[in-house]
Structures are given as C-alpha cells and as structure tokens.
Image: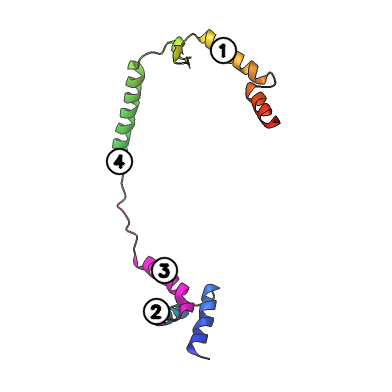
Amino acid sequence: MTDKEKYTRLMQRYWEAETTPAEERELARYAARTDDPAFDQLRGVLGYLSVGRTTRVRKGRRVRIYPIAAAAAGIAAVIALALTLRFAPARQADDLCVRYAYGVKYSDSDAIMTSVESSLADFFAGETPAEVQLFEMFQR
C-alpha cells in the first residue's frame, strides 16, 4: 500500500469522524506537504480548524452592579417617568381621531366614523369597483 492510498483511506475515515487525534495530526502533516488535488478540500478544512484553534476568545471583565447603585437608578427612572407624565401636554378627545382626505384635515370624530362605516359597507356589499374593473379587463 502506497502512502497516497494509506492517507486517502485515512482521509475517508476522517470525513466519517472515525479517526483519533493522533491520526488527524498525521493526516494534517501529510496534507500539508503533498500537492495532490485530492487533498485540497481536506487542507482547506484543516487550515480553517487550525486557525480557529489558535485564536482565543478573550473573556471580558465581569461588571458588578452594586445594590445601592441599582436602587438609585431605579428610583431615578421612576421619577423621570412621573415627571414626564405629569408635565406632558394633555390630549384632547377630538385629537385622537384625524383623517386626511385630498389634502384636507378632518378632526370631527362623528364624520370620520360615518365615512369609515360607509367605506366598509361599500367594501362588504359585494362587488367592489376594483373587482368590476378587473373582471372587465380579463373578460376581453
């Protein structure tokens, strides 16, 4: 059995995850020194894995939150929320419903709801103008 046959079988075992770490090191050494195109994919995978093994993940310092600082931050957030709600401009009921039609602003809630109900009634009445237009377009 030649070296190429031996390492080709070893490479097949590597792809099937049946090699030991010692066999993987031996296979990596052979793949690094051969120019055989059959080992190109293996070289790529082993090169990627070797780079991944050499880079170390740096652990950051743990941040410790002190209970007094956490309580102070919570109290400050509650005070900021209370002040925002206290001094925010009051909303009026007629500002809640606004409609823009053809560049004109309508703020009468009753008129807007009548318009919405009319549109919904037209929509659910049966054939909408869009359906009629599509029907006529494809009828030709």
Q: From mark 1 to mark 2, how far is it between C-alphas?
A: 77 Å
- For the residue pair 57 and 33, the one nearer the viewer reads as 33
Q: Amino acid at mark 3?
A: Leu
Residue tagged by mark 2? 32
Residue 44 is situated, as x and y percent measured from the top left of the image, at: 43, 71
Please identify, in this view, whether the residue under mark 3 or under mark 4 is nearer the observer: 3
Please identify, in this view, whether the residue under mark 4 or under mark 1 is nearer the observer: 1
Residue tagged by mark 3? 49
Residue tagged by mark 4? 66
Q: From mark 4 to mark 2, how far is it between C-alphas?
A: 54 Å
- Name the residue located 54 percent from the left edge and 77 percent from the top edge: 12
Please identify, in this view, whether the residue under mark 3 or under mark 1 is nearer the observer: 1
Q: Amino acid at mark 1?
A: Ser
Residue tagged by mark 1? 115
SS assignment at label 4: loop
Please identify, in this view, whether the residue under mark 1 or under mark 2 is nearer the observer: 1
SS assignment at label 3: helix
Mark 4 vs 1, N-terminal side: 4
Mark 3 vs 1, N-terminal side: 3
Q: Residue 83's image quarter?
A: top left
Badge 2 local density, few (<14 within 10 Å), some, or many (20+)?
some
Please identify, in this view, whether the residue under mark 4 or under mark 2 is nearer the observer: 2
Is residue 12 rendered to the left or right of residue 135? left
- For the residue pair 76 and 132, the one nearer the viewer reads as 132
Mark 4 vs 2, N-terminal side: 2
Mark 1 vs 2, N-terminal side: 2
